[in-house]
Image (cartoon, grey):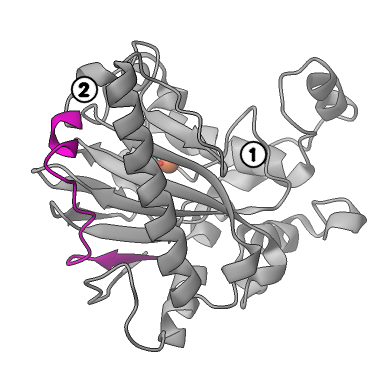
Amino acid sequence: MSIERLDLQDWQLNAAPDPAWQAALEDGAVLYCPNLCFALSSSEQHYLDPSLTNQKRKSIYIRGDSATLYGTDASANDQEGLLAMLTRYRSASMHLLTQMFPGYGPAMRPAGTSFRPRPTGTGEAALSWRKDDTRLHVDAFPSNPTRGLRILRVFSNVGTSARVWRVGESFEDMARRFVPNISAPLPGFAALIHSLGITKRKRSAYDHYMLHLHDRAKADLGYQRDCAQQRIEFAPASSWICFSDQVMHAAESGQYMIEQTIHLPRAALAYPEHSPLRILERMAGRELLPAAET
Ligand code: SIN
Ligand code: FE
């Protein structure tokens, strides 16, 4: 569990990157940039309004590198403005990461950009413990197995109150606690749910363990209360970066955040032995992705 403070002030890095950033990031740190502000224009300020999301959604978002907006029934004019704001965030965050981590640059795939105007813990999160991101978890999604792609995320607090996270123990300590009680994947199950359209691609053994770790940790209220953890307040107008498939995180409070998710192929990692895949493979004593993908 570690939080590293970086004194970045601009989405354009005006110096050479420090290689220690990448080492810390891949070791499971949150890189907190208290002075890195994603400034909203005066016309964007009125998007600080939770009623812009349509009822089912916690966020307003774009996917990949596309320009289609989802999650809102706002007027055509506002949709255009929201799309411009999200596209600008995607460019700024991808540009920054390319400069901070030159080895990731060409490999990074934008996976989604979202604006979250609701207070944390409301909406879907209040209805389902699985969707409740106020509980400590690593990111893993039932319908969207990554097959080993890493989940790298950049967050910016665009509201006026702090966004408060809890950050938990290391991935390895967490996995040691829960993996022994997770059954191996059932033969044929991943192919079945893929053929039924429940998953977007076939769930690998790696995805199976990641999803169960997400669920086991969220379901265990004793663990949530007693595990080693640290509370951190991300100030208004600040930003932070982490591998959210590795860092145990819980969004306790806050409102108005913009976030970029990036999928990163493992080949771009400088310290693959620190990755969740390698940690889980060491524990399982076997490979968790098909040979062609390892
Ligand atoms: C998450 O758990 O990925 C959401 C983090 C946040 O809402 O700050
Ligand atoms: Fe999460």
- What residue range appears in magenta? 29-47
Q: CA distance from mark 1 to mark 2?
A: 40 Å
Residue 195 numbered mark, or none:
none
Where disc 2 sits, the SS reads: helix
Examine the rendered structure and indicate whether residue 111 appears above or below residue 23.
Answer: above
Q: Residue at x 26, y 19 (%)?
A: 52
Please give the name of the residue rendered at 66% of the width and 70% of the height, measured from the top-left corner.
Answer: 268
Residues at discs 1 and 2 in contact (Cβ within 8 Å)? no
At mark 1, the secondary structure is helix
Residue 138, position in %: x, y? 49, 46
Location of residue 114 by image quarter: top left
Question: Magenta includes 44?
Answer: yes
Q: Position of residue 1 (x, y in %)?
A: 37, 64
Quadrant (top left, top right, bottom left, bottom right) of the C terminus: bottom right
Q: Residues within 10 Å of mark 2 (few under 14, many from 20)?
A: some
- Name the residue carrying label 1: 181
For badge 1, the amino acid type reads Asn
Whether residue 134 can be seen here: no
Q: Is residue 138 left or right of residue 291?
A: left
Q: Which amino acid type is marked by label 2?
A: Pro
Residue at x-position 45% and y-position 27%: 69
Residue 251 or 136: which is nearer the viewer?
251
Task: State the mark number for residue 50.
Answer: 2
Please check the rendered image and state whether residue 46 is part of the magenta-colored stretch, yes or no: yes
Going 91% across and 57% down the picture, which residue do you hit?
A: 291
Asked if residue 292 shows in the view, the reply is: yes
Between 182 and 150, the one nearer to me in the picture: 150
